[in-house]
C-alpha cells in the first residue's frame, strides 16, 4: 500500500547520485578504487586500523566469526532479540548459538549479568548487538571476555555513528560488523563493513572476503600482479563500486542525519510520556545512540496486532524488532528453542512495536505518527 508515513525512507542526495553515476561512467563496477577510498574513509571515521567493505552485514558477521576462530563444536553467546543473521553467522561456522536474555524491559541489549550464565568451556566468542543503535554497556562485558580469553564481536548493524565511552561502536570489541542495507543509517542498498585493530584477524578477513585469493581483480588490472594463490577457504563477499560510492558520499552526511534522528527520538519520547502504560527503552542509556529504531513497549493487556492494524488504517507503517530467534521453527528444531527459555526477551518480543524513524521526517509527520499511536492505544 502507499504509506502516508513509511517505516523508513531513503532520499539520496545530489552528491550520492553524482558519485554513483561517476562509477557507472567509469566502466569499472566490481570492487576497486572507490571501495578502497570508502574503506579508508570509514576506518578514519571510526578510528580503527582495518576496514573491509563486503556484500552485506551478514557477510561481515560470517567473516568476523570465522576470523575469531569459531568452528565446529564451539558455542557463541548471542542475543535472541535480534535479526536472525546474528545467530546464523555462528551456525554457518558449525557452532551452536547460546542465547542470553536481554538486560530488561528498559534495556533491550545483553549485559554482563545476562551473558555470564550462558558461558561455558565451549564458548568461543561473545556476539553483542547494539540494538536499535543504542550501545551495550561494554565495559563489564569486555571484563568478562578478557578474564576468559574470549573475543567479543560487535554486531553494529544498527549503530554506525553511535559511541560508548568516547569510542565508536564497532571498535570497542575485537571485531565490528556493520550493515548498509537500504533501511540502515548509511544505506547503499546492499553492503556491509567488517572492522578490527587486530592484524591477524584482518589478514584472515582480507583473504576470505574474496575466495581466499592473494590478489584481487583490481590488483591485476593495475598490473600489480599477474597471478594469485588461494591460501584459505574463502567466499564471494565482495562489494560493488556503486554501493561503495553511495557509502563514501553518504558518510559525509552521516553525523547530521544521525543528529536529526536523535531530535525525532526526543520528540517521540516527550509525547510517549503522555501515554500511561507505554514506554520506550534506553532512556539514560550509556553513550550516544545512532537512533536507528524507535521501539515502543506496549502494556501486556494491549494486543499488538490491533495497534498495528489501527496504525495501518491511519497510513503509518510499523514493524516488530524482533521476534525472538530461539522461537523460530529452525532454531526450535535444531537447537531445542522453547518458550520460557528467555523470559524478558520473550516478553519484549510479544509487546514491542517499532515506529517510523528516518532523517527526512519533519516535525509535523512525527506528531502525526504519535497522534495515530495515541488513537490506536486509546490514550
Image (cartoon, rainbow, N blue to C red):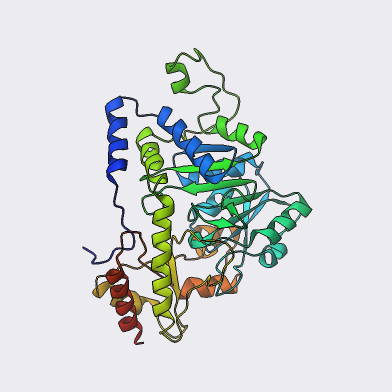
Across and down, in percent, residue 318 comes to: 35, 68
| Residue 127 occupies quadrant | bottom right
Residue closer to the observer: 208 or 367: 367
Across and down, in percent, residue 326 comes to: 55, 63
Q: Residue at x 40, y 31 (%)?
A: 34
Residue closer to the observer: 302 or 242: 242
- From the viewer's perspective, tell me whether residue 159 is left or right of residue 121: left
Q: Answer whether residue 339 is visible to the viewer in this image.
A: no
- From the viewer's perspective, tell me whether residue 185 is left or right of residue 149: left
What residue occupies the far right of the structure in this picture?
147
| Residue 238 occupies quadrant | top left
Across and down, in percent, residue 3 comes to: 24, 65
Q: Residue at x 35, y 45 (%)?
A: 189
Position above or below: 309 against 27: below
Residue closer to the observer: 263 or 301: 263
What residue occupies the far left of the structure in this picture?
2
Q: Answer whether residue 16 is visible to the viewer in this image.
A: yes
Q: Quadrant of the N terminus?
A: bottom left
Across and down, in percent, residue 240 comes to: 39, 34
Q: How many marks?
A: 0
Residue closer to the observer: 86 or 184: 184
- From the viewer's perspective, tell me whether residue 95 is left or right of residue 371: right
Q: Quadrant of the C terminus?
A: bottom left
Q: Residue at x 65, y 46 (%)?
A: 174
| Residue 316 occupies quadrant | bottom left
Amino acid at each position: 500500500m502507499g504509506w502516508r508515513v513509511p517505516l523508513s525512507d531513503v532520499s539520496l542526495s545530489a552528491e550520492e547520485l553524482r558519485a554513483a553515476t561517476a562509477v557507472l561512467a567509469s566502466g569499472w563496477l566490481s570492487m576497486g578504487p572507490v571501495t578502497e577510498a570508502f574503506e579508508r574513509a570509514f576506518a578514519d571515521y571510526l578510528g580503527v586500523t582495518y576496514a573491509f567493505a563486503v556484500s552485506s552485514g551478514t557477510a561481515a558477521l560470517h567473516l568476523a566469526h570465522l576470523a575469531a576462530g569459531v568452528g565446529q563444536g564451539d558455542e557463541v553467546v548471542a542475543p535472541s532479540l535480534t535479526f536472525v543473521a546474528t545467530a546464523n553467522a555462528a551456525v554457518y561456522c558449525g557452532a551452536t548459538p547460546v542465547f542470553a536474555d536481554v538486560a530488561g524491559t528498559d534495556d533491550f541489549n545483553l549485559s554482563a549479568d545476562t551473558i555470564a550464565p550462558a558461558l561455558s568451556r565451549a564458548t568461543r566468542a561473545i556476539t553483542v548487538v547494539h540494538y536499535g543503535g543504542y550501545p551495550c554497556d561494554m565495559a563489564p562485558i569486555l571484563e568478562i571476555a578478557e578474564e576468559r580469553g574470549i573475543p567479543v564481536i560487535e554486531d553494529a548493524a544498527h549503530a554506525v555513528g553511535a559511541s560508548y565511552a568516547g569510542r565508536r561502536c564497532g571498535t570497542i570489541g575485537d571485531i565490528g560488523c556493520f550493515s548498509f542495507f537500504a533501511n540502515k543509517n548509511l544505506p547503499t542498498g546492499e553492503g556491509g563493513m567488517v572492522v578490527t585493530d587486530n592484524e591477524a584477524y584482518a589478514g584472515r578477513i582480507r583473504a576470505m572476503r574474496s575466495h581466499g585469493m592473494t590478489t584481487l581483480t583490481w590488483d591485476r588490472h593495475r598490473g600489480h600482479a599477474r597471478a594469485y594463490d588461494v591460501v584459505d577457504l574463502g567466499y564471494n563477499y565482495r562489494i560493488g563500486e556503486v554501493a561503495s560510492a553511495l557509502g563514501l558520499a553518504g558518510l559525509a552526511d552521516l553525523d547530521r542525519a544521525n543528529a536529526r534522528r536523535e531530535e525525532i527520538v526526543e520528540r517521540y519520547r516527550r509525547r510517549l510520556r503522555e501515554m500511561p502504560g507505554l514506554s520506550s527503552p534506553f532512556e539514560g542509556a550509556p553513550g550516544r545512540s545512532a537512533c536507528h529504531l524507535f521501539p515502543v513497549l506496549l502494556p501486556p493487556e494491549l494486543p499488538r496486532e490491533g495497534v498495528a492494524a489501527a496504525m495501518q488504517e491511519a497510513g503509518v507503517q510499523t514493524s516488530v524488532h524482533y521476534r525472538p530467534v530461539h522461537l523460530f521453527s529452525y532454531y526450535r528444531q535444531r537447537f531445542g528453542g522453547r518458550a520460557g527459555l528467555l523470559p524478558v526477551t520473550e516478553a519484549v518480543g510479544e509487546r514491542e512495536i517499532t515506529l517510523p524513524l528516518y532523517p527526512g521526517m519533519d516535525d509535523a509527520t512525527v506528531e502525526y505518527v504519535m497522534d495515530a499511536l495515541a488513537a490506536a492505544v486509546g490514550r
